[in-house]
Image: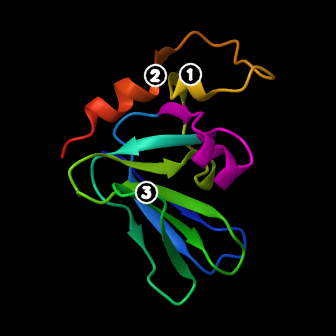
C-alpha cells in the first residue's frame, strides 16, 4: 500500500501515512468547520499516521470520543483520531503531494452543513446520527 509524506506549513512536523485508497471525504460538523474554517477534507487511514514527535505536536480532546492533532507552531490541522483506537484516522488531505486519482467519496454530518454552500460532486451522505452509530465503542 502506498505511503505518503507531508509536512505542516512551517515544516516543524513531518507526517507519513498509508492511504489505502485516495477517497476524499469531508465533515460538515460545527466542530470541524470551526477547526478548519471550512469542512474538514480528509483521507481515511486504518493505521495511525507516523508523526515526527516533538514539542510542536498539539493534541486537543474535542469530545469524549475524539482528539484533534495539529501543529502548535503554525496551526496546521494534521489529523482527527477516535480515542478508542479502533476507528479510522482522518488525515488532512492537503498535506500530501503526488496523490493521483483522488475521488470525492463521502460527506458526513450532512445535516450540520450550513445552507450557504454545496458541493456539486455526487457523494455518499451521512447524518450526524449515522456517524455516531458507526463509532465502535
Quadrant location, the N terminus: top left
Q: Position of residue 27 (x, y in %)?
A: 55, 35
Q: Residue at x 48, y 17 (%)?
A: 125
- In space, the residues marked 2 and 1 are separated at their CA atoms by 6 Å
Q: How many marks?
A: 3
Q: Residue furthest bottom?
A: 55
Measured from the top left, where is residue 19 in percent x and y? 39, 45
Magenta residues span 23-40
How crowded is the residue under tag 1: few (<14 C-alpha within 10 Å), some, or many (20+)? some
In magenta stretch: residue 110? no
Write down the residue under mark 2.
127
Q: Are marks 2 and 1 in contact (CB under 8 Å)?
A: yes
Residue occupying image coordinates x 71% and y 68%: 9
Q: Secondary structure at mark 2?
A: loop
- Inspect the magenta stretch and tell me whether residue 30 lies in it: yes
Q: Which mark is residue 63?
A: 3
Upstream in the sequence, badge 1 or badge 3?
A: 3
In the structure shown, which secondary structural element does the residue marked by tag 3 occupy? loop
Q: Residue at 34% across / 34% down in the picture?
A: 132
Q: CA distance from mark 3 to mark 2?
A: 18 Å
Residue 80 left/right relative to 10: left
Residue topped by disc 1: 111
The image shows residue 80 at horizontal and vertical percentages of 46, 54
Q: Locate residue 93, reporting x and y percent.
A: 57, 45
Relative to 68, 96 lies left or right: right
- Tags 3 and 2 in contact by the CB under 8 Å rule? no
| Residue at image coords 63%, 13% | 121
Height in image: 71 above or below 95? Answer: below
For the residue pair 67 and 78, the one nearer the viewer reads as: 67
Which one is nearer the viewer's eye here, 57 or 126?
A: 126
Amino acid at each position: 500500500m502506498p505511503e505518503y509524506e507531508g509536512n505542516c506549513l512551517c515544516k516543524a512536523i513531518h507526517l507519513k501515512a498509508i492511504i489505502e485508497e485516495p477517497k476524499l471525504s469531508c465533515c460538515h460538523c460545527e466542530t470541524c468547520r470551526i477547526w478548519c474554517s471550512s469542512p474538514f477534507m480528509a483521507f481515511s487511514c486504518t493505521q495511525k499516521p507516523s508523526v515526527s514527535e516533538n514539542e510542536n505536536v498539539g493534541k486537543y480532546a474535542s469530545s469524549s470520543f475524539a482528539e484533534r492533532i495539529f501543529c502548535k507552531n503554525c496551526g496546521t490541522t494534521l489529523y482527527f483520531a477516535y480515542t478508542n483506537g479502533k476507528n479510522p484516522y482522518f488525515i488532512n488531505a492537503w498535506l500530501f503531494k503526488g496523490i493521483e486519482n483522488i475521488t470525492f467519496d463521502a460527506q458526513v454530518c450532512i445535516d450540520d452543513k450550513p445552507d450557504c454552500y454545496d458541493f456539486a460532486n455526487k457523494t455518499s451522505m451521512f447524518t450526524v446520527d449515522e456517524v455516531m452509530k458507526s463509532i465502535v465503542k
